[in-house]
Image: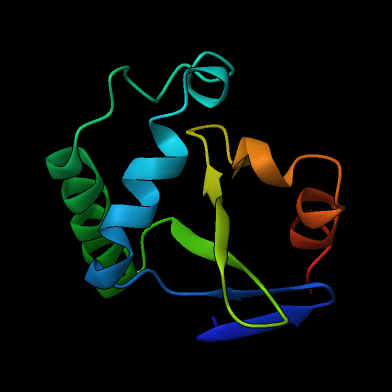
Amino acid sequence: MPERIASHPVVLRAFAFADAPRVTELCGDWEVARMTALIPHPYLPEMAESCIAGCHRADATDGPRTFAITRADGGLLVGAIGLATSAGRDRFARLLVGRPYWGNGYATAAGGAP
């Protein structure tokens, strides 16, 4: 799996620990958290760090890959997308975009990335 995937207007890349404050900010928004079954509220900084560490472990073991969704113009982190396979081999995506970025086509671009 490539390290970076461009799908205008976004670029998908691996998460870095430096992303933890931004992940905390995006996931800490109640309107975002309530749309998922996976994001607890309140969302604490150590939760973001643990999530990123989990992404790194999965990458190292060829587990489900989760990418940071960043804006192509400037690299601002706006969300995350992951692809997983269930026990029955069905694939499903997990997708999160921060509320300030809803309606900009970022989820569509990330979901359609090659």
In which image quadrant can residue 4 be found?
Answer: bottom right
| Quarter the N terminus occupies | bottom right
Q: Nearer the viewer, residue 73 or 94?
A: 73
In the image, 59: left or right of 76? left
In which image quadrant can residue 114 be found?
Answer: bottom right
User: Which residue, as the protein is rendered here, is positioned at the far left?
Assistant: 46
In the image, 64: left or right of 107? left
In the image, 84: left or right of 57? right
Residue at the image point whose x is 47% and y is 18% from the top: 30
**What colour scheme does the image use?**
rainbow
Compared to residue 107, the image places residue 3 above or below, namely: below
Query: Where residue 106 appears, x then y in whole percent?
Result: 78, 56
Q: Nearer the viewer, residue 26 or 52?
A: 26
Query: Where residue 103 appears, x then y in whole percent?
Result: 86, 41
Q: Nearer the viewer, residue 53 or 75?
A: 75
Residue at the image point whose x is 39% and y is 43% from the top: 25
In which image quadrant can residue 18 be found?
Answer: bottom left
Query: Where residue 111 appears, x then y in whole percent?
Result: 77, 54
Instruction: Say how many tags the image has.
Output: 0
Compared to residue 102, the image places residue 40 above or below, namely: above
Q: Nearer the viewer, residue 41 or 100?
A: 100
Residue at the image point whose x is 46% and y is 41% from the top: 26
Look at the image and tell me whether residue 91 can be seen.
no
Compared to residue 113, the image places residue 55 above or below, namely: above
Query: Where residue 83 appears, x then y in whole percent?
Result: 57, 51
Look at the image and tell me whether residue 111 can be seen.
yes
